[in-house]
Amino acid sequence: MKIRLKQEEEEEGVVTEALLDSGATGMVMSEEFARRHKFRRTKLERPVYVRNVDGTLNYAGPIVDTVEVEIFFKGHKEKTLIDVIREQKWSVILGMLWLGYHNPEIDWKTEEVNMTRCPDKCGKKWKTGRQTKPGWKKWEEREKKKERRKPTIEGVRMIERIREEKEDEEEDFIELRATEEMVP
């Protein structure tokens, strides 16, 4: 899907093709794309190691930078952080954090993506045919209740990093115990 990305002082930003990927956990931007378009990066306090589907560490190395951008798509607008990753084919990948938070309506046959179920924080709240049907007010109230229970993208990201740190600590502990058992 085509999106526009811009940083705070920019007027226009850049339009690019983003990949919606339910197999990816977070949101990433290729290092080459960030460099080519001169996105200002912020160093992370510590690297985030990326794991492949099979559980092995990604050969491109850890994520060490992030960029703060505004994403624009068909009236949808949000300010967010996107991790920068090396050796990435796609300029931007929007993974499960983004998909779960925004819950877009996707028509896989026509490849149409509509942001009809976005949280109010995102900017434009779309009006659809749903508002003309009986019971839409009750539906909207249920959606608002669900929305209040949803964690923010930053909250989900923090939980994911804590999980990764715990996994790393457990692996280190297992390696340490194995080394201690080998030493007489």
Image (tube, rainbow, N blue to C red):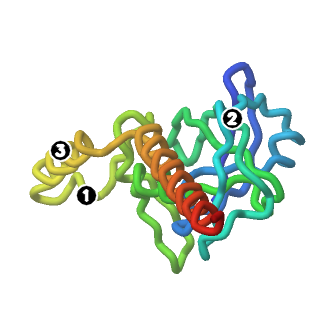
| Residue type of the residue flagged with mark 1 | Arg
Q: Quadrant of residue 9?
A: top right
Which residue lies at the image location 69% right of the left edge and 35% below the top edge? 67
The kind of residue on which mark 3 rests is Lys
**Nearest the eye: 66 or 143:** 66
Between the residue at mark 1 and the residue at mark 2, the CA separation in whole angstroms equals 36 Å
Q: Which residue is labeled 2 in the image?
A: 67
Instruction: Give the label, 3 or 1, closer to the camera.
Output: 3
Q: Is residue 2 above or below residue 34?
A: below
**Secondary structure category for the residue under label 2:** strand
Which residue is found at the position 53% from the left and 51% from the top? 169
Q: Where does the image place residue 154, in percent across and percent down from the top left?
A: 46, 38
On the image, the x and y values in percent for residue 105 come to 41, 63
Secondary structure found at label 3: helix
Compared to residue 83, the image places residue 182 above or below, namely below
Task: Report the residue at 50% width, 42% height from top.
Answer: 76
Q: Crowding at label 2, few (<14), some or many (≥20) Cα neighbours within 10 Å?
A: some
Residue at the disc numbered 1: 130
Find the distance from the CA under tag 3 to the CA under tag 2: 31 Å
Mark 3 Cα shell of 10 Å, populated few (<14), some (14-19), many (≥20):
few
Q: Which numbered disc, 3 or 2, marks the residue closer to the eye?
A: 2
State the residue lying farthest toward the front.
Answer: 184
